[in-house]
Structures are given as C-alpha cells and as structure tokens.
Amino acid sequence: MRHFKRAKRSINLSLEENICTYTLPNGIRVFTKQIPYLFSANLGVWVPGGSASEPEGKEGLAHFLEHLFFKGTKTRTTRDIMEAIECKGGQINAFTTQEYTCFYIKTLTEYVSLAIEILSDILKNSTFKEIDKERNVILEEISLLEDTPEDIILDLFHQFVWRKHPLSRPILGTARSVKHLTQNDIISFYKKIYSAQNIIITAVGNFNEEELLHNFQHWFHDFPKKTRREKMDPKPIFHAGMKHHSRDISQMHFCLGYPAPSMTDKERFICELASNILGGGSTSRLFYRIREQEGLAYNIFSFHDLFRYAGTFGVYAGVAPENFRAVVHIILDEIKKLKEIPISETELELYRQELKGELLMAHEHAETHMTRIGKSIIYHNHILSIQEILSSLDQITPSQICQFFRKYCTSTNIALVSLGPAKYKLSHKDICF
C-alpha cells in the first residue's frame, strides 16, 4: 500500500491493544483496530469543531450543519442514505459537542466499503437545501430540551459559569438564533471546519485492512486542504455565584459545581475518581446519604465535563422545592468531609475497582474503542491506551483525593444554578460553609 505512511503502531499484549495509524496523502489520519471475532465494524469520522467554534451570534450552527449532512447529497436523498445502512441492519448517526463533531456508522463487515462511500458522500456532497424544513425539526428539539428540566439545567449551568466564552453556547442553539441561521452561514462554517487536516477517521471491528484503507483513500482523497489556521479563543474563566430560573414545576432542579482540571491535565483522572466517590452511582456518598438514608431525592449524581482548556465538576439533583436547602447543605457537608478527612485506602480501592471494571466492560464494545481513539487524538494527539488509564487510576492516593477537593471545591469557587419555583430559591448565605 504505497499510498499510505504508517505513522504509528502500538501493541499492548496484556489488553490486546493493537492500533495502527495511517496518513492519507491529503493529511487525513486513519486509526484502525482489528477485532476479528466480531460480525461488524464501527467507522467514525471526527472533526474538531463544535458549538465553541461557531461565530458569535450563530449559536446552534455546528449542530444545524450536523443535521443537514443527512438531508440529501447530489446523488442520494435522505431516504437513500438511511436505507443504504439501516436496511442492512446497520446504524448511522452523528453527534455534536462543544469541541468536536462525530459521524459514525456501524455495519456488517461485508458492507464496510459501502459505509465508507456513504460517509464520504454526506461529508463532501451534501446540498444543504432543506434548511427551512430542518430548522423546524431543530426548533422542536430545542422545545423538547426546554421541557426536560434535568437536561436544560446542565445547559443553564454552563451558560452561567462560562458566561460570554464560546463554551457557554448551547449546543442546540436558541430558538432565536436557529431561526436566523442561513444557507450562507451553513456553507461558510462547513468550509471553515471540514478540511483534510481537521478530519480524523477511526475504524474498529472486523474488516480487511488493506481494502479499508484503499476505500478511504478512494473516497476521501479529494477533501481540500486548508492552510489558514483559526485563531484560538481565550482560555475560559470559571465564574462563581448563583443564578435562579423561575419556573412553576413540581421539583427544584439544580447544579452545584466548581471549576475542574481540563481534558489535558494530569489531574483529570483524580477528578474522575473523586466524582465517582461523591456521586458516581448507588454506592457513592451522596446517593447513599441523600437517597438511601434521608429519602430526599430520586435522581442525584455527580458530573465532570472536561474541555481542552478547562472543566467543571459538580452535582445535579432534582428534589421537592421544600427540601432544596437541606439537600444543598448535605452536599456541601459531604464535600467538606472529603476535604477534611482523607478517604481510607479500603474505600478508595472499592471506588477505583468500580471505575476500572466499568472501563473494561465498556471496552467489550467496539463503539467504546472507536470513541476512545477519536477523543484521544482530538485532545492529546496520541492514543491513550486502556492500560495508561488503568495505571493512572491505580496511582491515585487518598491524599490526592483530599487535595483535589481542597483545591477546587472552595467557597469562592462555588456556583449554584437552579430551576424551579421562585419561592424556594436560595441566597448566598445558604452556600457559605
């Protein structure tokens, strides 16, 4: 295969990690991992551009463009695209985040060549014509999100803590911004983001590697290169404080959070384990105390959203409005305990094994490998192996967990965003411990 330069090949025999890297002549990078006992393959095309890459005032543009890629090309209708994959038992879809967009297909091995052609066709030859029809679909999607308090509160939290930084933009956009997006906006954003040097391809599963590479070269070779580099946005600044959104609903939904390490920070693994300890599942401290002991919530969990240059760490809960203050105080009390009393080695090992077990079992699925590889290249420009992740988790000590909570969960760093009846909103003194 003289067209391809093998840039990297790493093998980890203990976890059967065998990922190969190739570079197409136009600069597109292809990462492959063979799992020969599967009947299928997962193909992903990743582009490091999402809602944070949108021009100011064009919120929802990246997500709108993602939708339009499935609305017809020069030779295929929407139905043609879907039938080509789904009528053979496969799946085709995409998702947009703040910092990247991914298009993926899962298909039987015998249809891999067709799947590559379909991905190429929608990404190169979409007509972007059904804008008004798709605009209505997205407006309905926004309405659905706004009618789902446990989902919209996370958007409201990010809008508050990141303020005017691009990370604050809602991925779906707002009804107002989406109504004003034009075909020129769509095409301009497409040309800005979708170029050869931005495209990362991941293929995981059962396929003929030489045939796969030949097909990627054939169908993706004419993606244009772009020499102009986009300017970097300023590093985001986390804004502490309180914000209440009044709504006449039966529960108070809220996010209580703090700044956190970035996706490229070594402390991100400590953050993940700390999040698991605080509210990661039914064995976590908050779940046990607030749901099992006190019976004050059905849904409570911790979250950590990590980006290239910043992150957030916190807790979401939906509770009866009259219990809002009590639940916030319990959360702050549990955080205080983790700051003042180091977790025991025994308890830490339980949470560590839980995370490691979840990680390994998730990697029984090709989709998880595909996602890990794609995100590793976007954020680290190298593949983060399963063994690296496990090793990083193994090295975390009780004192590091304690230090994490002391460093990030301070009274000056706290942000509380709530959605519910105005009568029960809290004041600053309620979160000052």
Image: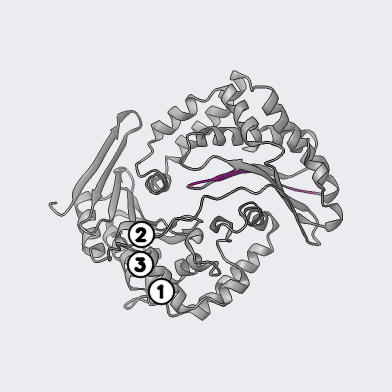
What count of labels does the image hold?
A: 3
Q: Which residue is mark 1?
A: 187
Task: Measuring from the top left, give residue 395's x and y in whole percent.
Answer: 48, 24
Question: In the drawing, does residue 62 fall left or right of residue 345?
Answer: left
Q: Earlier in the sequence, mark 2 or mark 3?
A: 3
Callout 2: few (<14), some (14-19), or many (20+) C-alpha neighbours within 10 Å? few
Task: Select label 3 or label 1 by which is in front.
Answer: 1
Identity of the amino acid at label 3? Answer: Leu
Residue that label 3 marks: 123
Q: Nearer the viewer, residue 327 or 296?
A: 327
Tell me whether circle 3 and circle 1 mark residues in contact (CB < 8 Å).
Answer: no
Local SS, label 3: helix
The amino acid type, in three-letter code, at marker 2 is Arg
| Amino acid type at image mark 1 | Ile
Task: Report which quarter residue 46 is drawn in.
Answer: bottom left
Q: Is residue 334 above or below residue 342?
A: below
Image point 82% across, 40% down: which residue? Answer: 326
Question: CA gap, disc 2 to disc 1?
Answer: 18 Å
Vertical relation: 254 (above or below) 273: below
User: Can I make out residue 315 in this image?
Assistant: no
Magenta-tinted stretch: 309-319
